[in-house]
Image (cartoon, grey):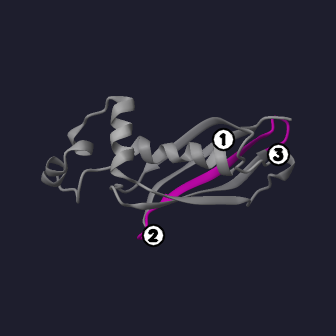
């Protein structure tokens, strides 16, 4: 887990990590949220609707942005203020996602920074784009 302090943050700083979407993640997300939409849980239904397989929850995909801030950038001192995201392609079980964030703006008065976020699958296709505003807790 990273431990960036605000003094360590500068425009252009980038962190990323990879994660594989699993059936277990899908089942846990369903249990936690109660979202049993057949597009996510029924492969036959999803295929009938024109998808390759059952589609991973968009919010499961977006939840990796919490890991980005809470573990990587800034890490331990993270306090997420806002998240904006757009889902640009479907994600499926087995997809290997690269989650990345790059600092685009720093506000020294409030110890807050903005970062551009992207999630790309193993084919190089962008599946999510957005931005986050993240504060850094003091010592």
- Crowding at dot 1, Cα within 10 Å, few <14 / some 14-19 / many 20+, comes out as some
Residue under label 2: 124
Residues at discs 3 and 1 in contact (Cβ within 8 Å): no
Q: Classify 109 as above or below 130.
A: above
> What's the residue at 23%, 56% (across, down)?
53
Q: Nearer the viewer, residue 96 or 87?
A: 96
Residue placed at 33% from the left, 41% from the top? Answer: 27
Q: Secondary structure at mark 1?
A: strand
Q: Residue at x 37, y 53 (%)?
A: 22
Q: Is residue 111 shown to the viewer in this render? A: yes
Mark 3 or mark 2, which is nearer the start of the sequence?
A: 3
Per the rendering, the mark at residue 5 is: 3
Discs 2, 1 touching: Cβ within 8 Å: no
Tag 2–tag 3 contact (CB < 8 Å) = no
User: CA–CA distance between discs 2 and 3?
Assistant: 31 Å
Q: Residues within 10 Å of mark 3 (few under 14, many from 20)?
A: some
On residue 133, which mark appears?
1
Which residue: 72% across, 42% down?
A: 76
């Amino acid at each position: 887990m990273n431990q960036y302090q605000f003094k360590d943050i500068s425009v252009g700083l980038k962190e990323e990590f990879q994660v594989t979407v699993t059936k277990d993640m899908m089942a846990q997300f369903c249990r936690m949220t109660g979202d049993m939409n057949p597009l996510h849980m029924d492969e036959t239904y999803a295929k009938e609707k024109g998808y390759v397989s059952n589609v991973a929850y968009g919010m499961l995909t977006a939840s990796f942005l919490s890991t980005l801030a809470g573990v990587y950038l800034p890490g331990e001192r993270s306090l997420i203020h806002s998240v904006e995201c757009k889902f640009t392609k479907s994600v499926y079980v087995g997809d290997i996602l690269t989650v990345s964030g790059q600092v685009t703006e720093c506000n020294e008065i409030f110890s807050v920074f903005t970062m551009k976020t992207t999630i790309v699958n193993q084919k190089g296709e962008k599946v999510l784009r957005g931005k986050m505003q993240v504060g850094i807790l003091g010592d």
